[in-house]
Image (cartoon, helix red, strand yellow):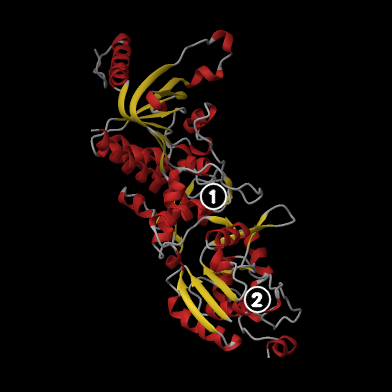
Amino acid sequence: MSIHLYTDYPFHNKDIAQYCTFLQEISVSIVEHFHFSELLTSPEKIASFAQSLASIRILSIDKKDLNTHLFPVEIEYEKKCLLNSSKASQSLYDGFEFQLLLRTEWPALFLKKERLNIILTERKLLTFEEDNRYHLRSIILGFPCIISITGIIEAPPKPKEYSLITRTGLTKELQNWLEQNKEKYLDYNDDRVPQVIKGYLLQSYFFWLKGAVQFCNNKRCALYNSHWQEEVLSAQYYHTLCDKHQAFIR
Amino acid sequence: MAEKIFSQVGEAEVTKAIVKGFLEQFYSYANSDVIIVGAGPSGLIAGRELAKQSVKVLIVERNNYLGGGFWIGGYLMNKVTLRSPAEKELQKLGVPCEEHVKGLWVADGPHACSKLIASACDAGVKFANMTMFDDIVLREENRVAGVVINWTPISALPREITCVDPIALESKLVIDCTGHDACVVKKLQDRGLIKMKGFGAMWVEMSEDLVVEYTSEVHPGLIVAGMSVSTVFGLPRMGPTFGAMLLSGEKAAHIALEKLKAMG
């Protein structure tokens, strides 16, 4: 068995080695890291992938309409983001379509069941849910498994007290709350993000082992399906498993 | 006879002065290099930047007043907000800005708006206010080559007493700065030449970057700037922040300059 880890961002690059080591330890497998740009082997491939990315951009979060009529500037923007890894795309993408796009563009890589493929991305990926609107996602399990860093930071809501203060419109109080409660939520350039990512790497590994999405009810297990920031910081942050799942991994 | 403060000039001379001044300008600007539709912040900045480079610019504005929504921040409150680095645009104009929280600046709406209008006038931009954009002028291969206009009050009167034909102005380029209505692009859509995507729900942090990124020529001869960008490309709406308006206007001017250069 082997694991391939793809990343499309540069600013956390110092952390990639620890992700590889972590995956190696839990899976006893060969782990290889690639930058996503290594897949874009020719100008034609870049152009066609940029066009496909522009076409899965979400236009409205309450409609499942994708972007059918493309303007050249939309494709150029995607191309610019692909060619310059320090320029993170600000667009919203349909997460399942993104996954499908990767499988369609690189079937030999991402449809290979003998290998766990994980994409670590800065893109904002959303999925259309039963309440008829798109929701931002931290992880989308499947072939390949996709972990979104912006999703980890922005998708799970901050504690309820934060949203209550937001609704009062008291800016100063909100600032004070953010200052005084940093331990309760994740932010950009937060040292805890790499630890949380390891929790989601574990979820990806379990998906691959079991062939199905595997969540746990134990709030301290990395397989817990966290919805709130505080839950992420108690489940994924410690990137450890409950006894039952630990036994399974052995 | 008691000495008067003001010089002695009759009513007819006052009328002649208005007519002559207006007609001379109107006559000259029947052909412009660039016509900008909409005198909001993006239109003013675009016009100013072009005029600074000696480009002949006319801004068409349906209201009597210029400045669009820049007088008022939001919800009738006259403080405007900008996210860094857009505050530098106002600081260059000498408008005091205060940092509310890190990266978010607040300025006095009337001060910011009046200085911006003045800077556009100082650069040489001319205005046709109380003038309603009615349609586009199309040339070979559907290139946009000007605008059809009429007086704004015409639209407020019953048709049976105001059957007034519009007139047309020609230009090498047109910039749509009409906000979420994207009136100019809509005329292309009505003719099946383009399909707008409609703006999404508000998401300030994401929208502003994208509005600047997507400011572009959407059809030969037509550039979009400001909030019309979000309507054309299906981006989230921005809310009462103005940074992207200013930077988008600036980018539109750069694009227009490049196009004009290429036209020779």
Q: Nearer the viewer, residue B26 or A208?
A: A208
Q: Is residue B98 visible?
A: no
The answer to whether B77 appears left or right of A40 in the picture is right
Relative depth, front residue between A95 and A104:
A104
Cα gap from disc 2 to disc 1, whole angstroms: 29 Å
Sequence-first tag of 2 and 1:
1
Q: Is residue B100 visible?
A: yes
Give the position of the N terminus of chain A as an image quadrant.
bottom right
| Residue closer to the observer: B85 or A73 | A73
Up/down of B200 relative to A103, above or below:
above
Residue A208: give its label.
2
Q: Write the residue at 56% across / 44% down.
A: A68
Identify which amino acid the numbered label 2 is placed on. Answer: Trp
SS at badge 2: helix
State whether residue B26 is above or below residue A58.
above
The numbered mark at residue A55 is 1
A97 on left or right of B64? right
Q: Chain of mark 2?
A: A
Q: Residue at x 42, y 44 (%)?
A: B215
Look at label 1 and name its amino acid: Ser
Above/below status of B8 relative to B122: above
Q: Position of residue B82 (x, y in %)?
A: 44, 53
Q: Do tags 2 and 1 sit on the same chain?
A: yes
Callout 1: chain: A
Residue drawn at 39 percent across, 60 percent down: A83
Residue placed at 59% from the left, 62% from the top?
Answer: A99
Q: Position of residue A102 (x, y in %)?
A: 55, 61
Circle 1 crowding by C-alpha within 10 Å: few under 14, some 14–19, many from 20? some
Is A211 left, or right, of B135 in this rendering?
right
